[in-house]
Amino acid sequence: MAEKLAPEKRHSFVHDGKTIFEWDQTLEEVNIYINLPPNVHSKQFYCKIQSKHVEVGIKGNPPYLNHDLTCPVKTDSSFWTLEDDIMHITMQKRDKGQTWASPILGEGQLDAYSSDLEQKRLMLQRFQEENPGFDFSQAQFTGNCPDPRTFMGGIRND
């Protein structure tokens, strides 16, 4: 049932008509997906994930991404992989349930409507996690959605 509340589609950060990266989030993680250039050996790519910063590039070249993150992450639980010409960066949110408007501070922010949809989806994901016997995949919120981090005493860290 939890799969039904997974992100339906990725958000895109586009600059000058070019997709820089795509991203999505869950209660616990933010994922960045970067299409890799052709004809570059996989060992040439690098990714440095710090608590409030990410740097991605090809060794010996200026970084492709070198930006502060919107919110802090747990570096010991964050990692990156290369698969099918895509770099997938998985960053563990320091504050579980926090809704990110973008992984990169000040870049590609979700509009208010999309941000509200993300917050509602994360709230339903929280309900599903805390009540595994119920199916919240068809549930809907009317009006403003509460913050998943703080609603009804906050997220349990069992």
Image (tube, helix red, strand yellow):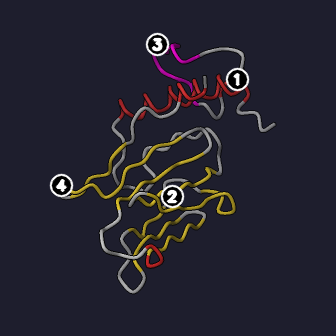
Q: Considering the numbered disc 2 on the image, is that residue within a helix, a strand or a loop?
A: strand
Question: What is the C-alpha distance between the residues marked 4 and 3?
Answer: 35 Å
Q: Which residue is mark 4?
A: 17
Magenta stretch: dominant secondary structure: loop
In primary-sequence order, the first of circles 3 and 2 is 2
Q: Which residues are magenta?
A: 136-147
Q: Which residue is mark 3?
A: 142
- Is residue 88 positioned above or below 57 on the image? above
Residue located 47% across and 34% down the image: 7
x and y percent of residue 134 in the render? 67, 14
Q: Which residue is mark 1?
A: 152
Q: Considering the numbered disc 4 on the image, is that residue within a helix, a strand or a loop?
A: loop
Label 4 CA crowd tier, 10 Å (few <14, some 14–19, many 20+): few
- Is residue 153 positioned above or below 94 on the image? above
In primary-sequence order, the first of circles 2 and 1 is 2
Label 3 CA crowd tier, 10 Å (few <14, some 14–19, many 20+): few
Three-letter amino acid code at disc 1? Met
Residue located 24% across and 57% down the image: 15
User: Residue farthest to the right?
Assistant: 158
Q: Considering the numbered disc 3 on the image, is that residue within a helix, a strand or a loop?
A: loop
